[in-house]
Amino acid sequence: MAVDLEALQAMLEQAVPYIRRLNLKIKSLGDGKVTSEMAFSENVSNHVATVHAGAIFTAGETTGAALVSSVLDMGKLVIVVRGAKVNYRKPFRERLVCTGTIEPLAVETAMAAVERDGKYNFPVKLQMTNEKGELAAELEFEYHLRKIN
């Protein structure tokens, strides 16, 4: 199923206006894979003029949520981030790219648990790199899924 990236971007920016300030863009989404980009600017820089840790976190969490939402029936679920772990590897002063993948078996496991228990904590791993593929951060998020009654 093709994802309308323009509509998704508008929805994300409406729901979380901070995303617009970060200039975070979902570039591709589908088949259990996601890619986003965050341009480097003063809006995302810290006191030493590199990408701020909070900007990396927010870009990763938003990208992960888009990925989870793309593989699950969101008409039947509520999704909220429950936990996170970020390993910052190298500072950058340039555009960063965030990527992630969810395997079909993980989706089946999640949906079976939601059907059985009404909820599930869905783990998602992402990577943030520069455009050359050099690692800026490894991100792990746990999204709490709850069945809508």
Image (cartoon, rainbow, N blue to C red):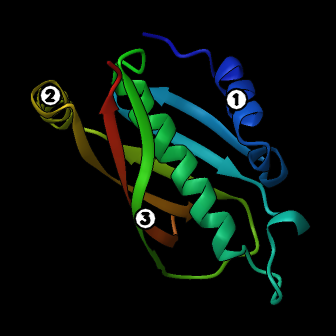
96 on left or right of 86? right
Q: Name the residue under label 1.
A: 9
123 on left or right of 96? left
Q: Is residue 118 above or below residue 49?
A: above
Q: In this view, does 20 lie above or below 70?
A: below
Q: Name the residue under label 3.
A: 139
Q: Name the residue under label 2.
A: 108
Mark 3: give few (<14), some (14-19) or many (20+) Cα within 10 Å: many
Residue 7: percent from left, percent from top? 69, 18
**Quarter location, residue 125:** bottom left
- For the residue pair 40 and 47, the one nearer the viewer reads as 47
Separation of disc 1 and disc 2 at Cα? 27 Å
Q: What element carries label 2?
A: helix
| Residue at 62 percent of width and 58 percent of height | 58
Earlier in the chain: of badge 1 and badge 3, it is: 1
Earlier in the chain: of badge 2 and badge 3, it is: 2
**Disc 3 residue type (three-letter):** Leu
Residue 130: percent from left, percent from top? 61, 64
Mark 2: give few (<14), some (14-19) or many (20+) Cα within 10 Å: few
| Residue at 39 percent of width and 35 percent of height | 68
